Amino acid sequence: MTTCKAPHKKPPGRPALPPDKAQTAMIRERVTEAQRAEYEARGGKAWLVAALNRKRK
């Protein structure tokens, strides 16, 4: 007789991100089409996050 072990189960879902990488808030603002185009031209989300993270000199 052979014994069968149950395969190791992975926890459901995606692993948690470190606190400094977690994105828990959303910003939604109304802008003109020209402002939206400028936002996209500057890099969109990545540009905004970098601008917010920059320290003032």
Image (cartoon, helix red, strand yellow):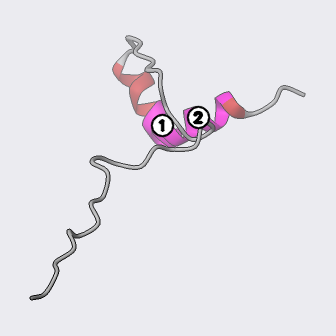
Mark number displayed over residue 1: none
Residue 53 as seen in the image, left or right of residue 35: right
| Rendered residue at 47%/21% (across/down) | 25
**Where's the N terminus, which quadrant?**
bottom left
Place of residue 47 in the rendered image (x, y in percent of width and height, measured from the top left): 57, 39
44 magenta-colored: yes
Stretch in magenta: 39-52
Residue furthest to the top in view is 30
| Rendered residue at 47%/25% (across/down) | 24
5 magenta-colored: no
Along the viewing direction, whichever of 12 and 48 lies nearer the viewer: 12
Residue 4 as seen in the image, left or right of residue 20: left
The amino acid type of the residue labelled 2 equals Val
Q: Residues within 10 Å of mark 1 (few under 14, many from 20)?
A: few
The amino acid type of the residue labelled 1 equals Lys
Place of residue 22 in the rendered image (x, y in percent of width and height, measured from the top left): 52, 36
Mark number displayed over residue 49: 2
| Rendered residue at 49%/32% (across/down) | 23
Q: Residues within 10 Å of mark 2 (few under 14, many from 20)?
A: few
